[in-house]
Image (spheres, helix red, strand yellow):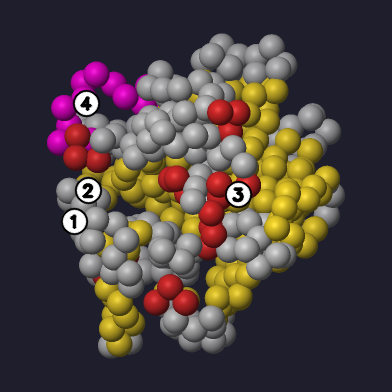
Amino acid sequence: MRIEKCGHFVDEREVHRYILENKNGVQAVFTDLGAVWLSFLFPDRSGKLVDVLLSVENWEDLMENPGHMGEVVGRNANRINGGHFQLHGKDYHLFLNDKQHSNCHSGPEYFGRRLFQAKQKGENAICFSLFSKDMDQGFPGNMDFSVTYELTEDNALHIRYKGSSDKDTLMNFTNHAYFNLSGHDQGNIAEQSVRIFASAYTPSDEYLIPTGEIRPVAGTAFDFREERPIFEKAFKKDSELLAAGGYDHNFCVDGEAGTLRKAALAYSKKTAIEMSVETDCPGIQFYTANFLMAEDMGKDGVSYGPHSGYCFETQYYPDAINVPNFLAPIVAAGSTYHSETIYRFRQRLI
């Protein structure tokens, strides 16, 4: 592991980059500012290293970071309808930061804008931790949180989340990495193919809030049970895709929540890079960067824009705390929450 100084946070604490590299030359780069995943370099079919992760140009840009690129999201990922929930009969109100209709990603006091404590956990593992005080972001309980990234010799990036609180509270963490397996600077991802191991999804309204229904994907634009191009012509007029500007939907991962299992797969013919996703979470949000703006400059001076990458955000279902038939992300006081997501990379020469 290599550690580099980047500069200073607003309170003059130092900001660092952490560079993990395995024996195959694969590199993963992180920073203690927001516990952000900055880049992932993997060889294409010719052996050239390709950075498949969208990110900002300079570390200072992380304080704005359009689209939350690479950020750890907590305490609650995705949306809570009306910014309101009840826990044990008590009402909690969160800031309405998404079209004045919901709270999204626990903003505006995002984890991604905070400086974490960093601790090396081996040659190729780094742990970022922070303390979130009672009623931080509007959630109850003093919470200790950590996320550990580990790059293994089989070209997998393991993300392990851990949280504990002195009060019953919500814990629903994810990483908001944007992938483009052709290269972060290669533009539209329409021709890349995706498979999602989900027989059902949660339909949403015009505000991207789930309706509460769990609907089979069969015969819909959301059927990725077999690998196919992300945007197929047959689905261009789907009402939900038109409302969201693309995919921004939760899929109900097949298998038992709490068990590590395959959730998704993506592939680029251009580079022959394949990525698979495993998680123990109940759901996965497939998001095709619908709201990235071309004027938001990324690294290497690249303008990303809509559909220049995609996210696989492992999670509890959006607004699960308010929907009785969704598994709620409630963690009891004194207990410890654990979750793991794995991104595996390989060359698939066909």
Q: How far apart in space, not on screen, are marks 1 and 4 (Cα)?
A: 21 Å
Q: Which mark is on residue 211?
A: 1
**Which mark lies nearer to you, 2 or 3?**
3
Classify mark 4: helix, strand or loop.
Answer: helix
Pointers 4 and 3 in contact (CB under 8 A)?
A: no
Mark 3 lies on residue: 60
Q: How far apart in space, not on screen, are marks 3 and 1 (Cα)?
A: 38 Å
Amino acid type, residue under disc 3 in the picture: Glu
Classify mark 2: helix, strand or loop.
Answer: loop
Q: How far apart in space, not on screen, are marks 2 and 3 (Cα)?
A: 37 Å
Classify mark 3: helix, strand or loop.
Answer: helix
**Which mark lies nearer to you, 3 or 1?**
3
x%, y% of residue 19?
76, 43
Residue 237 within the magenta-colored segment of the rendering:
yes
Q: How far apart in space, not on screen, are marks 1 and 2 (Cα)?
A: 6 Å
Q: How far apart in space, not on screen, are marks 2 and 4 (Cα)?
A: 15 Å
Earlier residue among tags 2 and 4: 2
Pointers 1 and 2 in contact (CB under 8 A)?
A: yes
Q: Which mark is on residue 155?
A: none
Earlier residue among tags 1 and 2: 2
Mark 2 lies on residue: 203
Amino acid type, residue under disc 2 in the picture: Pro
